[in-house]
Amino acid sequence: MSDVKKFLYVNRKAPYGTIYALESLEVVLIGAAFEQDVALAFLDDGVFQLTKGQDTGEVGMKNFSPTYKALGDYDVNKIYVEKESLDARGLTLDDLLPLTYEDEDDDWAEKDSIKVVSAAEMAEIMEQSDVILSF
Amino acid sequence: MALEVGGKTVETDEEGYLENRDEWNMDIAKAIAEAENLDMTDNHWEVVNFLREYYDEYQIAPAVRVLTKAIGKKLGKDKGNSKYLYELFPYGPAKQACKIAGLPKPTGCV
């Protein structure tokens, strides 16, 4: 019998100013070792975590945004971004880091990890998850 | 803790990981390896250099599972397996090779 649970990490805060975004990312990377079904959700200011061209020179924090690109290596390839949150901030998919993974079941074809979903679809994703961790 | 290399003192944490990875050079790597009773061969350097490149790109030291897979992709299946990597780095390829590479302990390692 399989004990695989569906984990959803919900990220709602801007990447810098608080430690939530970095902590969430570290927990995801550590948790990925346990071979659970992991998905990430980005809503509200959390969508800024995935934006391209982050420069933390002035805020004195490490720019950890390149680490999101490693998620594919960790087999974390379901990344949901809420469309309403992007719209409200004048962002589109093109403003986000191009996160990809290699599909083992499809001859290692490179595929996009990010999926933009509506608020209603996001609610459904949360509904389907066994464990939700909010950051 | 500190390490003496070529008349210079390099700061490390209590487990021997470099405090400042910008101070790293090959002599420091050799000194760390020596302290761990490791004789650095080309095969060791290959893994150490791979880790440093990975860190530059992603800002993290990869977990051993990820390292194994990535090495296999880059250097071939005969190297991308834990037997090969554990033979090179008996105390754990990610942990020990990261220490020699001057990187922090891999995320998720205890």
Image (cartoon, rainbow, N blue to C red):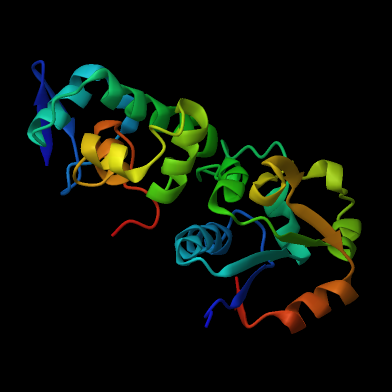
- Foreground of the two, B74 or A11: B74
On the rendered structure, is A132 left or right of A111? left
Write the residue at 61% across / 66% down: A38
Q: Is residue A14 visible?
A: yes
Where is residue A81 drawn, in percent x and y? 79, 60
On the rendered structure, is A105 left or right of B83? right
Q: How many marks?
A: 0
Where is residue A116 drawn, in percent x and y? 85, 58
Write the residue at 31% across / 47% down: B105
Write the residue at 50% across / 28% down: B74
On the rendered structure, is B100 left or right of B22? left
Where is residue B50 drawn, in percent x and y? 41, 28
Question: Which quarter of the rendering shows the C terminus of chain A?
Answer: bottom right
Residue B55, image quadrant: top left
Residue B86, image quadrant: top left
Where is residue B53 drawn, in percent x and y? 46, 27
Above or below residue A127? Residue A69 is above
